[in-house]
Each structure stands twice: as structure tokens, then as C-alpha cells.
Image (tube, helix red, strand yellow):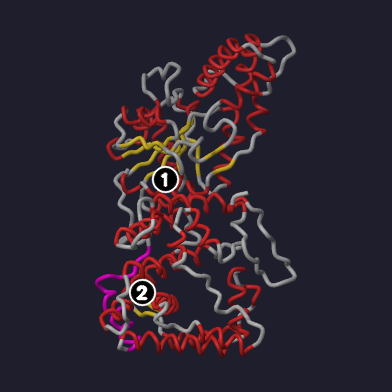
């Protein structure tokens, strides 16, 4: 059983909400976790993070690439506050480490790229653990599953300084033993900046006296309001509050000694850089992914919605073969061709599921046979990819016009597809049958004015992606008629589809790009290049 398939351990509601050890994201969070892993794997490919070697500029750029994709994949955890914290941690870590290098007090210079990447990785690990049901190990799991080497992972030792020992004296000795020394200066730098990496107000960084004062507030915190992954830390800080203060005070003294100046002076220096180089979040205008299109037309099945017939008809064909008792291979091939042709007719509204089933039974079955195509479609398990939903919401937030357009079947559209998409958080409305272009344009305008996403269904358009049957009486194909209705410039429009043949069709219709969708993480990572 792989690490992200292990069953989730539940906590006892009658005890503090802490989950021990090696749990993984809850089931509903796993698609997001997998996408974070894939985004990290793509970002870290061909770097020392996954291949070993010295950490340099290439590696820090790779980590920032991942951190630019992470807020789209998981905007709940990588929210504005978290993004701000990560940026401050990385920048402050480099500034403090640079001061230490300038002082010459350490025997060997700190690798500033390594310092920055450890600071960023430190935050990624802790950030991901904030999902309810995660442990502090999830961040490490993310990096490990992304292919990080054991050498790279060793840069992030477990944060266990608050774990209680047998008695208070042993705990005091433990804290004394790990008080920063030249054996691990980078850890000391990351520790110090992590605790002050917050803007108390615009342009004003958190101070160390505030951090020390906050320790006293632990006694006022209700453990029921603490994330499971934070409970053990809270419990031990509360139990050893005096020793924790000693640790922090010794940390300040050590770092200031190595820098040869006060921490306050470095904080002040950092604040002076903010007017010219402000801390901005991913969604802020000053730091956003470059997007080179204005309209995005998303497919549904195989991109947003997944189920028995979302990517191919293979499962339905196999069930039909079994229901009709077809064994001869040549007849199976003929049935497959007839089935595919029937689906093409379904998708342009020429026949219903019932009519298609009657035709298949007449050609390949016998009197009394029943396939139950409608039941087969409804019986399967369907799910909507939350990462693609987040990507759509991000694009709309950036002012990109988003359209959904699908080859689909009218019999199950309203009862199956639409409810799943709405439950996933997408505000969508059908454009409806397109007979008159002007009326369709008016309908789209009403939908968008209401803040919803227009949806074009092939059975309403009377034409489908990929051809296979005659087009509309006016001769317009799938993408051309959508462009006509939207009034959009095709040179600023992209199509996102899991079938390459449909992507090429969009490009032939003049679209800027037909993007071949593979996974949500791959799409998000590649957004700046589309």
C-alpha cells in the first residue's frame, strides 16, 4: 500500500485532536495532495533536489516555480497569509545569512541558495500539515513523493524540540543541546526568521519581543481550537514554557553574535526594502503568472468530470457486449463501430439513449434483450477534480473568460453532469439549444452578467468535436459556432481538452492554442507557456 493510499487514522473526539505519526490527507483532500506532489515533481525535475548535488540558483527557481502553482492547486492552505509568510521567510533567511557571511564569524560561508530553499521547504512542510487530519509528516511525504533525494530531505530534520522527556531536567538538557551552534547555523537562521515572518501592519515586520510575549498567551488558547498537527507542540510549549523562552532567547543571542549586529537592525533594513520590493501574494497584481490568452474553453469529461464514459466508451461497450452475449470477435468489432456511431448521433441530439439501445439490440441481440444504457451511465462513480475547479476559479479571478463546452448526451446532462459540477462549486448555466446566433449571444450575456459560466452542450449545438456526423445546417462546426456566439478573438482563445484530435480541431479553427490536457497539475505548471 502506497503512502497516499493508507487509511486515515481518526482521533477520539473525547481527547485532544491529535493524530499520531504516519497519517495521510483525508480522502477528499487526496486529489489536491496528489496534484501538489506532481507539481513539485515537474518543478524539481533535472535539479539537485531530485538528482543530488550542490543547491544553487536553479534549485531556488524550481522551488519558487512550485510555490507559484501551489496557491492555484490548494488556495485554502496556500492562502494570502501563508503566501506572505513564505515570501518573508525566504527573503529574510537570505538577508540574515548574508549578514553572517559578511561578518566572517563562521568558519565556512553559508550557501545562500541552500538557506533560501531550506526556508521555503521548511514552510511547505508545515503549511501542508494544516489540513485537518494531517500530521507534521505530510510535508516531508510531499517532497519525498516528488522525488527529492535522501540528501535533500536530510536538510529538513524533524521538529521535535518540544517533545517532553522523562523529567524537566532532561527537557532542559535537550533544549540546551540543540541551542544553535556552528554545527547547524542554517537551521538557526531558518528558525529565527520563521518566527518573525509576518507583517503586523503594512511595511512593519513582526518583532522578537512580540514573539516572546506570545509564548505567554499559550495558556489562554483552548486546545479544541488547535489543528491536530499543532496540538503536541502547543501541549509541550505550555508544559515547558520557561525552557522554551530560554531556547528562543539563546537563539536570538547566538544569531546576533554571528551577524555582529542586532536583529532589530536587520529587521529595520528589511523594512526599508519593502517600498521598492513589497511583499505581495500570488494573486496580487505585482506578482502573478503571465497569462497569454483572454478566453479559455474547457472540455468537461476527462478534464473536469471523471466517470465510466468521461474519457472513452470502452466500459459501456464492454457492458453491452456482455449484456447481448456477443462472443464472436468480428461481431464485437461491428458492435463497437455501431456503438461509437450511435454515441456520435446521441451527442448531436439526433437520437436518444432509448432509440440507440433499440437499434443495438435489433442488430446484435435478440427479442427480450435489455442493455440498460441509461442505468449503466447513472450507476457508475463520478467525481469532479477539485484542482481543475480551483484553476478555473483562479483564471476567472484574473479576468479570464471561462467557457465549458462538451460532447455530451442530453439524456443524462441535467440529471448527472450539471449537478456534479454545481456541487463542486462551479456556478454554471446552460446556454441551451442554439438555433439563432443572436439569441444565443443574448443568452450568454445574461449568464455572464449573473456571474455564472456559460456551458455549451454538443446536443444543443447540433454539432460535436471530432466530427463523425454531419454538422449544422449553417455549416458551422463546434469551435467556429462557439467563437461566433462569444464574439471572441480566436487569437486570444485557448481550448483545454483531453483528446488531442479535439485540440488540433480548435487550432484549425484559429484558436491560439489547443492544450492537450493530461493532469491538472501539468496544466497549472504550464499556464505561463500556453
With 402 as the anchor, is 268 left or right in this view? left
Split into 4 quadrants, where in the image is the C terminus? top left
**As drawn, 122 above or below 454:** below
Dot placed on the residue nearer the N-terminal end, 1 or 2 = 2
The residue lying toward the viewer, choosing from 100 and 394, is 100
The residue singled out by tag 1 in the image is: 522
Res. 347 visible in picture? yes
The residue singled out by tag 2 in the image is: 93
**As drawn, 259 above or below 20:** below
The residue lying toward the viewer, choosing from 150 and 370, is 150
**As drawn, 171 above or below 79:** below
Res. 198 visible in picture? no
Tell me which residue sits at (53%, 70%) in the image. 158
The residue lying toward the viewer, choosing from 249 and 200, is 249
For marks 1 and 2, give the CA distance.
30 Å
Element marked by disc 1: helix
**As drawn, 316 above or below 274:** above
Amino acid at each position: 500500500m502506497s503512502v497516499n493510499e493508507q487509511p486515515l487514522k481518526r482521533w477520539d473526539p473525547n481527547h485532544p485532536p491529535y493524530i499520531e505519526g504516519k497519517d495521510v490527507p483525508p480522502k477528499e483532500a487526496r486529489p489536491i495532495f496528489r496534484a501538489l506532489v506532481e507539481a513539485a515533481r515537474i518543478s524539481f525535475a533535472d535539479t539537485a533536489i531530485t538528482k543530488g548535488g550542490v543547491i544553487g540558483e536553479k534549485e531556488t527557481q524550481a522551488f519558487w516555480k512550485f510555490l507559484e502553482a501551489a496557491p492555484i492547486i490548494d488556495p485554502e492552505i496556500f492562502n494570502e497569509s501563508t503566501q506572505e509568510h513564505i515570501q518573508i521567510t525566504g527573503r529574510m533567511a537570505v538577508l540574515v545569512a548574508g549578514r553572517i557571511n559578511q561578518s566572517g564569524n563562521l568558519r565556512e560561508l553559508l550557501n545562500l541558495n541552500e538557506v533560501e530553499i531550506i526556508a521555503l521547504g521548511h514552510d511547505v512542510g508545515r503549511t501542508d500539515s494544516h489540513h485537518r487530519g494531517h500530521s507534521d509528516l505530510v510535508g516531508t511525504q510531499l517532497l519525498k513523493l516528488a522525488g527529492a533525494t535522501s540528501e535533500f530531505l536530510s536538510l529538513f530534520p524533524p521538529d521535535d524540540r518540544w517533545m517532553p522527556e522523562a523529567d524537566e531536567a532532561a527537557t532542559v538538557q535537550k533544549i540546551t543541546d540543540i541551542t544553535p551552534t556552528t554545527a547547524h547555523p542554517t537551521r538557526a537562521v531558518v528558525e529565527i526568521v520563521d518566527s518573525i515572518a509576518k507583517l503586523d501592519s503594512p511595511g512593519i515586520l513582526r518583532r522578537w519581543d512580540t514573539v516572546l510575549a506570545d509564548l505567554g498567551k499559550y495558556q489562554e488558547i483552548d486546545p479544541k481550537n488547535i489543528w491536530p498537527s499543532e496540538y503536541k507542540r502547543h501541549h509541550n510549549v505550555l508544559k515547558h514554557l520557561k525552557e522554551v523562552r530560554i531556547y528562543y532567547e539563546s537563539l536570538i543571542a547566538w544569531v546576533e553574535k554571528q551577524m555582529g549586529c542586532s536583529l532589530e537592525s536587520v529587521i529595520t533594513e528589511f523594512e526599508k526594502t519593502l517600498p521598492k520590493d513589497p511583499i505581495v501574494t500570488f494573486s496580487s497584481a505585482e506578482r502573478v503568472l503571465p497569462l497569454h490568452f483572454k478566453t479559455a474553453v474547457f472540455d468537461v469529461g476527462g478534464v473536469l468530470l471523471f466517470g465510466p464514459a468521461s474519457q472513452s466508451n470502452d466500459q459501456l461497450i464492454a457492458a453491452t457486449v456482455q449484456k447481448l452475449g456477443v462472443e464472436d470477435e468480428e461481431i464485437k468489432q461491428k458492435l463497437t463501430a455501431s456503438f461509437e456511431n450511435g454515441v456520435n448521433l446521441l451527442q448531436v441530439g439526433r437520437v436518444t439513449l432509448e432509440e440507440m439501445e433499440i437499434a443495438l439490440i435489433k442488430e446484435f441481440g435478440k427479442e427480450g434483450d435489455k442493455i440498460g444504457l441509461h442505468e449503466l451511465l447513472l450507476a457508475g462513480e463520478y467525481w469532479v477534480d477539485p484542482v481543475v475547479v480551483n484553476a478555473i476559479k483562479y483564471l476567472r479571478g484574473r479576468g479570464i473568460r471561462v467557457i465549458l463546452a462538451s460532447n455530451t448526451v442530453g439524456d443524462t446532462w441535467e440529471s448527472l453532469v450539471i449537478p456534479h459540477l454545481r456541487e463542486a462549486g462551479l456556478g454554471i448555466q446552460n446556454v441551451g439549444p442554439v438555433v439563432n446566433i443572436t439569441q444565443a449571444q443574448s443568452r450568454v450575456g445574461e449568464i455572464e452578467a449573473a456571474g455564472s459560466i456559460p456551458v455549451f452542450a454538443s446536443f444543443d449545438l447540433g454539432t460535436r468535436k471530432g466530427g463523425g456526423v454531419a454538422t449544422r445546417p449553417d455549416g458551422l462546426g463546434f469551435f467556429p459556432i462557439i467563437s461566433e456566439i462569444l464574439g471572441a478573438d480566436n487569437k486570444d482563445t485557448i481550448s483545454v481538452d483531453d483528446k488531442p484530435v479535439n485540440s488540433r480541431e480548435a487550432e484549425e479553427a484559429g484558436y491560439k492554442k489547443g492544450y492537450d490536457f493530461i493532469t491538472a497539475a501539468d496544466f497549472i505548471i504550464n499556464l505561463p507557456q500556453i
